[in-house]
Image (tube, coloured by chain):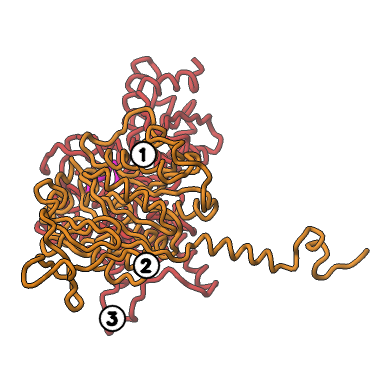
Amino acid sequence: MTFEVKSDILKPEDFKLEGDVKWCPGCGGHAVLAAIMKALPETNVKKENVVFVSGIGCSSRFPYYINTYGFHGLHGRAFAIASGIKVANPKLSVWVVTGDGDSMAIGGNHFIHILRRNINVNILLFNNKIYGLTKGQYSPTTPKGSITKTSPDGTIENPFLPGELAMGAQGTFYARVVDTNIQMMQDIFVKAARHKGTSLVEILQNCVIFNNKVHEEITGKEKRDENQLYLRHGKPMIFGKNSDKGIIQSGSKFVVVKIGENGVTKNDILIHDAHNPDDTRAYMLSRMTLPDYPVAMGVIRDWQSDIYESLLYSQIKNARKNSKIQSVDDLLNHGNTFRL
Amino acid sequence: MGELRLMKGNEAIAEAAIRAGCDAYFGYPITPQSEIMEYLAAEEPHKRTGMVLLQAESELAAINMVYGAAGTGKKVMTTSSGPGISLKQEGISYIAGAELPCLVVNVMRGGPGLGTIQPSQSDYFQATKGGGHGDYHLLVLAPASVQEMSDFVPLAFDLAFKYRNPVMILSDGVIGQMMEKVELFEPRPRNTRFDQSWVTTGKTPDRERNVISSLDLDPARMERHNYDLQAKYLKMKDKEVRYEEIECDDAEYLLIAFGSASRICQKTVKLARQKGLKTGLLRPMTLFPFPEKIISKLAEKVKGILTVELNSGQMVEDVRLAVNGKVRVDFYGRMGGMIPTPDEVLKEIETKLTGG
């Protein structure tokens, strides 16, 4: 679907709303909001053709804070609501804003099915690894062993990695960003909007009240260069303060190597191919966790496949074209008719 | 005298669950009742009694965990509020159909939809008329104090096992969040004194194997099953009606209210009597079965009845059925988290009932 309006018409301020943003001071959500306001003008979409859909949770207050159409739905059901919106009116640019509880717990089922269908919707998943709105219970992404209000002895559940789940559900676009880098978020949000099909952007977000510094190991100034691998399509998977570390594949595993050591050169480092139809490496990248690996950031997978609503509307078009009934007269005179 | 404590209503439910010998709790956080699961987690009931606690991935999962666990003959429960209770309705209907005992607590908030997190009594219809699909009823208990939040838990388990039926404690955000003195009851054993021959704990040589199901495709057998259920509800109506009469003996005007609304009306009764209006209060403690006989009896001697609810008028329909036109029945309610004052209710008595 293309839109005729030029990008220079809209500015980030056009998406601002009067009134308070009722997230805690210091919440990662503020940065995401700023980044999306910068990204939206670049997506060449009229404001009145944009709709933000959410479920329940702190993240899901998003539609109240942005000057587009909004839909504050049911807990976990935003994906189903967004599917309905997009299928009924494919002209709209549809964004789902969700959290780790909303999308991974109660909405887990709808989450995998929107990805499987590949409906052209953009998902912003705020992952702060805790239930913030209900004040601090563990979520499906909370690391095992975490002490929370409902796990005083530590959680005994294995957490989900959203990317891992998305790959398992045949997701065609998956990116990961941090809430401390507005520029990175803006770039990735634009890429997500341009991708045709369901785009999932996982935002590693800080909850300043109930899970403060949860992503500190990844986002902290001292550690981020060593602990983040920022992926760019067609570029080698190199990271580290001195850009001297990289990823190679050995057998079925990724291995972190140092360039210049043990005869490893820059040419040995894997080149990132986000457009690869085979999702094996995307799956492996999405699963990389500290301390053995850096955490992969940026667009991990961006593969163009069939879009659900395009197939649906082409079926409708074909059915119309091939139908024996092309007019009201055809309809009235087809089948068994008789004269009085 | 039992141990005295100052507690929130939600905490009292949780403490009572441990003391009542509850085997398992399955829940999902939702305001205004998240303290129930948090209190249980902090108390570590697995160390106190062996009780299991699990935070499910949704209310749907929680009620189905209850369904499974109830089938094993254990004392099991879940708690939630409006939106979560709506999600549980499918499971509750199956549990009622399969005739399994369990406790469901609804700490009501205002609806419809996401509504508000403020207190309300707008789930009365849902609780008392079935809620899910099919011809069934829950036993519904309506606590009006933190004390009753505690006391009703062992009662609910007893009723659930006695009738093999889900029991609901229909509370609200006021009772859940407010703090009052509670006298805690002595801990009870986890096993139940009621019949357990129906549970899925293996087949003994003296009986057929048990299969938990709510399905029967044979229409005649299904009808018989439905008649059996209805007979059970009739028995509940006969045996389990509970209510409190406050200054009803000489009352000329009668207030009818449950839960937090009845607490407001208690004060109104005092204010009205100071003004010389002989007013009484009937407080249903069971909403199903509904105290229709006493209401019918009182209707014969009072000049007017005012039903007060934190909703748009739900229980008033049952009051009118019970009164059956014998006397005028009026309604006063506030919605969406708004709570009437005792004076507001008094004014309603004066304008609607006394004609003054």
Q: Quadrant of the C terminus of chain A?
A: bottom right
How crowded pointer 1 is (Cα within 10 Å; few <14, some 14-19, many 20+) is rated as many
| Observer-nearest of B25 and A23 | A23
In the image, the segment drawn in magenta is: B30-36
On residue A170, which mark appears?
2
Visual hue assigned to chain B: red
Magenta span contains residue B260: no
Reading the image, the residue beneath label 3 is B203
Q: Where's residue B298, x and y in %?
A: 44, 34
Looking at the rendered structure, the kind of residue marked 3 is Lys
Reading the image, the residue beneath label 1 is A37
Chain shown in orange: A
Dividing the picture into quadrants, the one containing residue A38 is top left
Reading the chain from its start, which is encountered first: label 2 or label 1? 1
Looking at the rendered structure, the kind of residue marked 2 is Gln
Q: Are marks 3 and 2 in contact (CB under 8 Å)?
A: no
